[in-house]
Amino acid sequence: MIKTDVVIIGSGPVGLFAVHQLGIVGLKAEVIDNLDKIGGQCIELYPDKPIYDIPALPKCTGKSLTDNLLEQIKPFKTNFHLSQRVESISREDNNWKITTNKKNIFLASNIIIAAGVGSFEPRKLQINEAEKFENKQIFYSIKDKTFFKNKKISIFGGGDSALDWAIELSKFSEVTLIHRRNEFRGVEHSSEIARGLEKEGKLKIKTPFSINSIEGEDKINAITIKNEDEKIEKISTDYILGFFGLIMKLGPIAEWGLNLDKKTIPVNTNNFQTNKEGIFAIGDICSYPGKFKLILSGFHEGALAARACFKLARPNEKYRFEFTTTSKTLQSRLGLKKSD
Amino acid sequence: MPKITYIEYGGKSHTIDVANELTVMEGAVQNDIPGIDADCGGACACATCHVYVDKKWFNKLPKAEEAEIDMLDVAFEPKKFSRLGCQISVTDELDGLVVKMPSKQA
């Protein structure tokens, strides 16, 4: 179990700046994110897209914004717990107990939810029986490729993951790559390799096809695929791999007893607290009259929430408002020496 | 103002005025029309404003750019006349446009 002052759910720009604001007031934070990397939508959706409305940064990208924020919070030596989703929260004495799907447990006086539109999860095959076979014969990621050795594999998708795994697994398995249009969107080099393997008879490619049905009662033995003209083909299959990218889902947050408005959490604008004491929501996931889904608004929300966290984490201390330009205390928290 | 008709998956139809230069997605979101999620807010990054454009209208729209076509791959049940609402800017020429929503966005 990890004890801390604040658990931040979500490592997007707003969650990262909340780390900074908490650090400034002397609070420790632990950050949890379901992605395998830090940065949230900025890294997953638009690492290279330009952003023009961050104050004092005329132009940056999702990646450079994330890198800069990481640099800015370096003094606070924050732990990131990636590739895991917060499943449940409960009250324990004066703290919140936070449990992730990897069974990591945190105890904190405050939770800041900076989860954007929810956690990133793999988009799944949209066919009724698919759920029944998930993690048995249908997978959306690969942990151990030898598991698929000498099997019949049907891979769906047109991006880099689909192409890379089709190429890799075709070395020792019978692979069919199925994509809904003729062009692949992965890097050109990979689609050339895949087309080359197809010519050599080492990889089957079926385009433009999508899944039509799964055959087999307790065990998948084949699938059928169809194209726009309703032409149907059957493919003998042991395992199905789907690489359709990621989608954002609110997930378990909806079950924590927080007030919800569509996919957002209503907060008050004094400190961005939700209907539960010690749980705050900032960034895209929070809503209040006049809310704008801008990164800069999320920074402001985090600054206020951090001060409110202080009151609950340090009930016997008085919060003093100070500036980083002049306060020796803040400068020492930032790791600055006199000569800096 | 151009009129755009949004038809929910269940068949319920909404015809509304959408100002020029707004997108088909924004027209729906600003008027609380169900069936368009627009999770990423219009960055062509999530495919949750996916619509089926009426056949008669599909070829009258400016062609989709590559980023949109790529993103449509990950939409829920993309078809021949699929587009992303956030990538269709409303103009006077689109007065009367009809789009249908998929059964769900994700």
Image: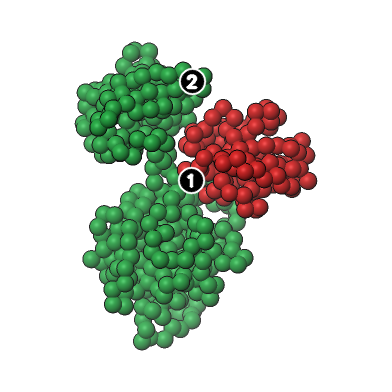
Chain colours: A green, B red
- Between A222 and A281, the one lying in front of the other is A222
The residue to which callout 1 is attached is: A45
Query: Is A159 drawn above or below residue A118 in the view shown?
Result: above
Mark 1 belongs to which amino acid? Answer: Leu
Which is in the foreground here, disc 1 or disc 2? 2
Q: CA distance from mark 1 to mark 2?
A: 33 Å
User: Does A243 sit left or right of A284 as displayed?
Assistant: left
Who's the residue at 44% across and 69% down the image? A280
Who's the residue at 54% across and 51% down the image? A60
Place of residue A68 in the rendered image (x, y in percent of width and height, measured from the top left): 46, 57
- Which quadrant would the N terminus of chain A be assigned to in this image? bottom left
Place of residue A234 in the rendered image (x, y in percent of width and height, measured from the top left): 36, 19
Who's the residue at 48% across and 80% down the image? A322
**Identity of the residue furthest to the front in this view:** B11
Mark 2 belongs to which amino acid? Answer: Glu
Query: Is A285 drawn above or below residue B75 in the view shown?
Result: below
**Residue B46's disc number:** none
Place of residue A324 in the rendered image (x, y in percent of width and height, measured from the top left): 48, 75
Q: Which of marks 2 and 1 precedes in the sequence?
A: 1
Q: Disc 1: which chain?
A: A
User: Does B77 sit left or right of A36 as displayed?
Assistant: right
- Between A72 and A188, the one lying in front of the other is A188
Whether tag 1 and tag 2 are in contact, CB under 8 A, the answer is no
Place of residue A75 in the rendered image (x, y in percent of width and height, measured from the top left): 37, 66
Crowd tier of the residue under label 2, counting other residues whose Cα lies within 10 Å: few below 14, some 14–19, many 20 or above = few
Q: Quick check: do tags 1 and 2 share a chain?
A: yes
Q: Disc 2: which chain?
A: A
The residue to which callout 2 is attached is: A230
